[in-house]
């Protein structure tokens, strides 16, 4: 490993330990040594860097550089150029990002671009439209500002056949990293709001649920049930055993404070995903200050919804039953405004679909505002 690689790895490790929002996103970028660029660049798949430039930075400045490139991806700059001049777009994106990093306590260099009083708080598009023409030149795709270069996301598979990163995938990664950072309280509120604005309402809740369920399933090939498609050819081959997503528990918060429109929206998405994943069984629990009703559905049965309740909110008894009941679920999906008493965290994974901006004290929280 070269000296520049070691410095980059050390800086990324610092981000993972001290700034998990940026550290999580940095793990999605493959470091790529590129002596042809002046400083560094990012395209959503790779983090390119000039080793000489990396060697010139202090550890703190290199940490800030990696965070800078991660923000280009988190804020969608790699997808938002829309035909604009690449060099101008890079400058327009760098100006607000560097201020965000400075406000968050990163060691930005004084020669990095920062906003004028007029540019503070403005979007990259607003700044771009008011930039004076820049002289052309530099290496690669446009002349990068000292903090690095933002490139368009690739559109095709790489040399190893890996598909190009999509805007939806980066939004998903960013939303998950943001939720984790909020739970730890280590992301400045202003930057969190800016990232939320960039995410908008296009977080794919359905894709997130599918991912959550698939991580709990154990699909495998079974020799006990031969694949009938090949028996006619005298081939005894295994069939895919997809019955291994076991019992799933769904918690519906039916307290008086829950927004019914958001509740119905979330319930519809959960129903669609459960239909597709087809778990062995599903139990739907309606909970306010206690468990008011439980409905159970076998594999393949359509879910029916019978909300009841309307009092305060205390999930303690529900999660105690989850932990100690006879039919322990492989996971829990809970829909709530999170104005509640939670009790102790169970050993099973819990995904909270939050109808507000609150974050649960444990489990994974995803906002579902429409």
Image (cartoon, helix red, strand yellow):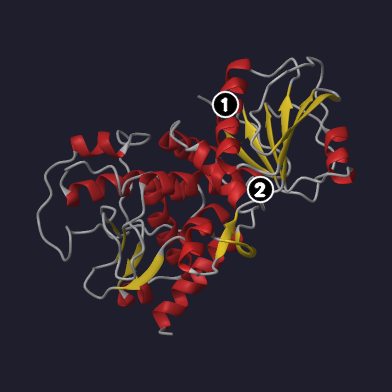
The answer to whether residue 285 is left or right of residue 94 is right
Left or right side of 130 for 237: right
> So how many labels did they put on this image?
2
Which residue does the numbered mark 2 point to in the structure image?
184
Q: Quadrant of residue 137?
A: bottom left
Whole-Å distance between the Cαs marked 1 and 2?
Answer: 30 Å
Give how far across and how far down residue 287 sits, in percent. Answer: 79, 25
Q: In the image shown, does 85 or 365 lie closer to the viewer? A: 365
Please name the residue shown 53% across and 61% down the image. 15
Nearest-to-viewer mark from 1 and 2 = 1
* Residue drawn at x 25%, y 50% as measured from the top left: 90
Residue 232 percent coordinates (x, y): 48, 63
Q: Which percent across, then down, holds residue 4?
A: 40, 78
Towards the viewer: 318 or 186? 318
**Looking at the rendered structure, which numbered label has been put on residue 268?**
1
- Please report whichever mark, 1 or 2, sits nearer to the chain's N-terminal start: 2
Q: Name the residue nearer the viewer: 145 or 6.
A: 6
Please provide percent x and percent y for residue 210: 55, 44
In the displayed structure, does residue 85 sit left or right of residue 149? left
Q: Is residue 128 above or below residue 201?
A: below
SS assignment at label 1: helix
Q: Nearer the viewer, residue 255 or 88?
A: 255
Quadrant for the N terminus, please: bottom left
């Amino acid at each position: 490993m070269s000296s520049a690689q070691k410095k980059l790895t050390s800086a990324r490790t610092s981000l993972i330990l001290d700034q998990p929002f940026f550290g999580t996103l940095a793990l999605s970028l493959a470091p790529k040594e590129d002596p042809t660029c002046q400083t560094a660049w990012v395209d959503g798949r790779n983090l390119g860097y000039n080793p000489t430039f990396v060697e010139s930075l202090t550890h703190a400045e290199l940490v800030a550089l990696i965070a800078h490139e991660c923000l280009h991806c988190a804020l969608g700059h790699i997808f938002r150029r829309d035909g604009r001049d690449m060099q101008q777009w890079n400058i327009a994106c760098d100006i607000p990002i560097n201020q965000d990093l400075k406000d968050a306590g990163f060691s930005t260099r004084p020669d990095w671009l920062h906003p004028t009083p007029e540019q503070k708080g403005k979007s990259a598009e607003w700044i771009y439209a008011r930039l004076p023409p820049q002289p052309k030149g530099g290496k690669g795709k446009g002349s990068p500002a000292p903090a690095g270069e933002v490139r368009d996301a690739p559109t095709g598979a790489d040399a190893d056949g890996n598909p190009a990163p999509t805007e939806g995938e980066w939004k998903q990664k960013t939303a998950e990293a943001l939720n984790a950072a909020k739970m730890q309280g280590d992301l400045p509120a202003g930057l969190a709001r800016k990232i939320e604005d960039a995410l908008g309402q296009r977080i794919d809740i359905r894709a997130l649920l599918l991912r959550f369920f698939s991580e709990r399933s154990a699909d495998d090939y079974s020799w006990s049930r031969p694949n009938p498609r090949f028996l006619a050819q005298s081939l005894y081959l295994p069939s895919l055993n997809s019955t291994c997503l076991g019992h799933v528990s769904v918690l519906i918060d039916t307290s008086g404070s829950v927004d019914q429109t958001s509740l119905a929206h979330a319930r519809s998405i959960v129903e669609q995903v459960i239909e597709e994943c087809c778990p062995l069984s599903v139990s739907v629990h309606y909970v306010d200050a206690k468990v008011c009703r439980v409905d159970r559905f076998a594999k393949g049965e359509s879910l029916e919804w019978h909300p009841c309740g309307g009092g305060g909110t205390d999930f303690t008894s529900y999660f105690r039953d989850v932990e100690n009941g006879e039919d322990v679920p492989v996971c829990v999906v809970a829909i709530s405004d999170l104005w509640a008493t939670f009790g102790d965290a169970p050993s099973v994974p819990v995904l909270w679909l939050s109808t507000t901006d609150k974050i649960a004290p444990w489990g994974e929280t995803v906002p579902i505002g429409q």
